[in-house]
Image (cartoon, rainbow, N blue to C red):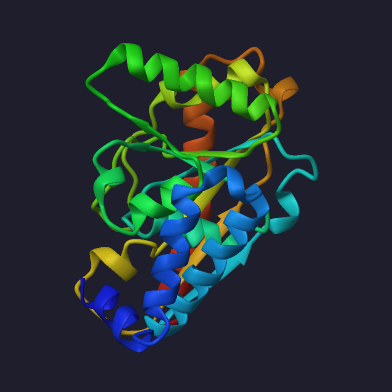
Amino acid sequence: MKRILLMAIRNIFLLPSMWIRLCYHAAHLNKFTEEEHYTLLKKIVQRANKAGNVTIEPYGIENLPKQNGYMLFPNHQGLYDVLAIINASPNPLSVVAKKEVGNIPFLKQVFGCMRAFLIDRDDIRQGLQVINDVTTEVLKGRNYLIFPEGTRSKRGNTMREFKGGSFKAATKARCPIIPVALIDSFKPFDANSIQKVTVQVHFLKPLYYEEYKSMRTTEISKTVQLRIYDVIKEYTQEEQETK
């Protein structure tokens, strides 16, 4: 966690005020609009990135639907993933995360501002309730982020198998499904280094309901994973070839 320490040290004079504002927003959700919460989060993430030698390269922002009420499904590389997507996405979003992550300071407050749903993977009933809650929120026009691997791959740019159940809320809401390819997102927080790092966030072309309505969730998961795999393979190969 050397990079987190570096972020804190280089923002030492701003850190108290940023922390107070973040905690206040997390504790007073109804006092601010979703856009106001999201604007604060983006400012904090951008300052942290600058201090921590992290650069975000977004691709495919034009692929995001003009109308809100869609779901993003990225590969899951590390603790930094959500922050990378917040930095890259122009539209407010929320997240479904495992409950253990919700206890990590800073991420706890970030997830609070995002009105995130924290899922207990050992409680089937609670998991089904989260699916229903996310479906309802997406139908209201909110955007949600779910990691279909279920947990960090801990293998760099190599993915675990995507789980079909992760797509149930999207199919129930009949919303656009946006594959998101993260490249080198494990490096900021999961690698013990403070060297400059560039994280790529690729928003891929959506799958609309008409395209996936006849598919099982396992088929949807394989389709999304393959599209993400192709992008990661393409860009990591290009990086190797330029070295």
Quarter of the picture holding the C terminus? bottom left
Would you say 163 lies left or right of 68 here?
left
Q: Residue furthest right?
A: 66
Q: Is residue 155 visible?
A: yes
Q: Is residue 157 visible?
A: no
Q: Quadrant of residue 202?
A: bottom right
At 64% from the left and 12% from the top, the residue drawn is 214
Would you say 86 lies left or right of 75 here?
right
Quarter of the picture holding the N terminus? bottom left
At 61% from the left and 52% from the top, the residue drawn is 203
The mark total stands at 0
Q: Quadrant of residue 166?
A: top left
Would you say 142 lies left or right of 147 here?
right
Q: Position of residue 50 (x, y in %)?
A: 46, 82
Vertical comparison of 30 with 136: above or below:
below
Q: Nearer the viewer, residue 186 or 105?
A: 105
Q: Quadrant of residue 57?
A: bottom right
At 65% from the left and 21% from the top, the residue drawn is 212
Q: Position of residue 123 (x, y in %)?
A: 26, 17
Vertical comparison of 71 with 181: above or below:
above
Q: Nearer the viewer, residue 165 or 82?
A: 82
Q: Position of residue 176 (x, y in %)?
A: 68, 32
Q: Nearer the viewer, residue 28 or 148?
A: 28
At 52% from the left and 62% from the top, the residue drawn is 41
Vertical comparison of 195 with 17: above or below:
below
Vertical comparison of 49 with 180: above or below:
below
